[in-house]
Image (cartoon, rainbow, N blue to C red):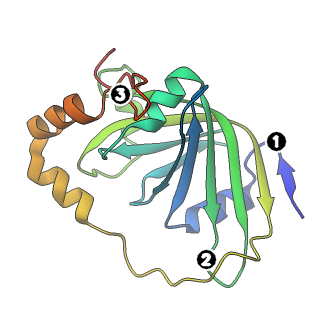
Amino acid sequence: MAKFYAELTPALCEFIGRQHMFFTATAGPAGRINLSPKGLDSFRILNVSRVAYLDLTGSGNETAAHLKRDGRITFMFCSFDATPLILRLYGQGRAIQPRQQEWAALRAHFPPLPGARQIIVADIASAQTSCGYGVPRYDFHAQRDTLAQWAEKKGPQGLEAYWHDKNQRSVDGLPTGLLGD
């Protein structure tokens, strides 16, 4: 049975802390819906109604573009161990880039992962749990280091050039705001 919460409880926070992966979902007013897997110790609970994740450089920047237009975001955490559970967080989000005043204080919550391009902050309106009985069981082995190696090889100037070429617009042509548009 689905159960709704107005804010994150200690048990929900503990569940989030045990997960090695989470998913984000966003959508603009039209066009594609984006659903992305995330990992690498990049999610933080700031308080019972605010969360954030360190967004690392990737092939697209759909989340930032959608948040700029619409603001809606859903996070999903799935248990892949013996105790099934799915947790969804529903909220309004925004992207904080390194040039913004809030960046330094928020960045301090995360490990020094290479390739950080923005921090997605979301105010959570509600949380929902569901059974997860249909989710398969998997064993966690390790986080991948491919993205970190790629970002380190690019270096700061290479990453900025990549952001300029690949991360300023969504697949549907929406501006992301990454470089100040």
Q: Residue at x 57, y 39 (%)?
A: 26
- Residue corresponding to mark 1: 6
Q: Which mark is residue 37?
A: none
Q: Earlier in the sequence, mark 1 or mark 2?
A: 1
- Residue corresponding to mark 2: 80
| Residue 152 in picture, x, y percent from top left | 14, 52
Q: Residues within 10 Å of mark 1 (few under 14, many from 20)?
A: few
Q: The C terminus lies in which quarter of the figure? A: top left
| Residue 128 in picture, x, y percent from top left | 78, 52
Q: Residue at x 18, y 50 (%)?
A: 151
Up-down relation of residue 31 to residue 109 (above or below) = above
Up-down relation of residue 46 to residue 64 (above or below) = below
Q: Is residue 49 visible?
A: no
Q: Secondary structure at mark 1?
A: loop
Up-down relation of residue 17 to residue 138 (above or below) = above
**Do tag 1 and tag 2 residues touch (Cβ < 8 Å)?**
no
Q: Nearer the viewer, mark 2 or mark 3?
A: 3
- At label 2, the amino acid type is Phe
| Residue 55 in picture, x, y percent from top left | 39, 43
